[in-house]
Amino acid sequence: MPHITYVESDGTEHTVDVEENMNLMEGSTINLLPGIEGMCGGICSCCTCHVYIDENWAAKCNPMTEGEKHLLEGSKHRKASSRLGCQVVITYEMDGMRVHLPPDQT
Ligand code: FES
């Protein structure tokens, strides 16, 4: 299983194994990590799974949909590296990926 490291805004790191074909939101919530709520269950309507993905890993992620882009535009902590974790499907190519959480998700 791919190892994914979730980094809280204070620098606290959590590295977990996540099954392929799960998404980054599920990988966090199933491991009971702090910072990603996934309130809408992954239907791209809440923005509580906001993450930042480093540029070198972004190319390994599935493309952003218009719905994801639209929802992220409403986030005050949006950056160029922003994604919604529920929309990023994990593949084995992502083994070692690090994702960072915005400051309003603790
Ligand atoms: S879990 Fe709601 S938008 Fe991702």
Image: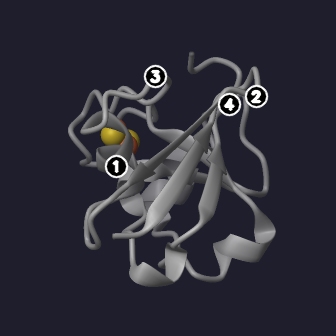
Using a 10 Å C-alpha cutoff, classify the residue at mark 1 as few (fewer than 14 neighbours), some (14 to 19) or many (20 or more): many
Q: Residue 102 carries which label?
A: 4
Rendered location of residue 74, percent (x, y) = 60, 35
Residue type highlighted by circle 2: Gly
**CA–CA distance in space, label 2 to label 1:** 19 Å
Mark 3 or 4, closer to the camera: 3
Residue type highlighted by circle 1: Gly
Q: Residue 11 carries which label?
A: 2
Q: Can residue 42 be seen in this view?
A: yes
Using a 10 Å C-alpha cutoff, classify the residue at mark 2 as few (fewer than 14 neighbours), some (14 to 19) or many (20 or more): few
Cβ of mark 4 under 8 A from ligand 1:
no
User: Of callouts 2 and 4, which one flags the residue occurring earlier in the amino acid sequence?
Assistant: 2
Residue in the image at 75% along x and 61% along y: 54
Residue type highlighted by circle 4: Pro
**CA–CA distance in space, label 3 to label 4:** 12 Å
Q: Which mark is residue 27?
A: 1
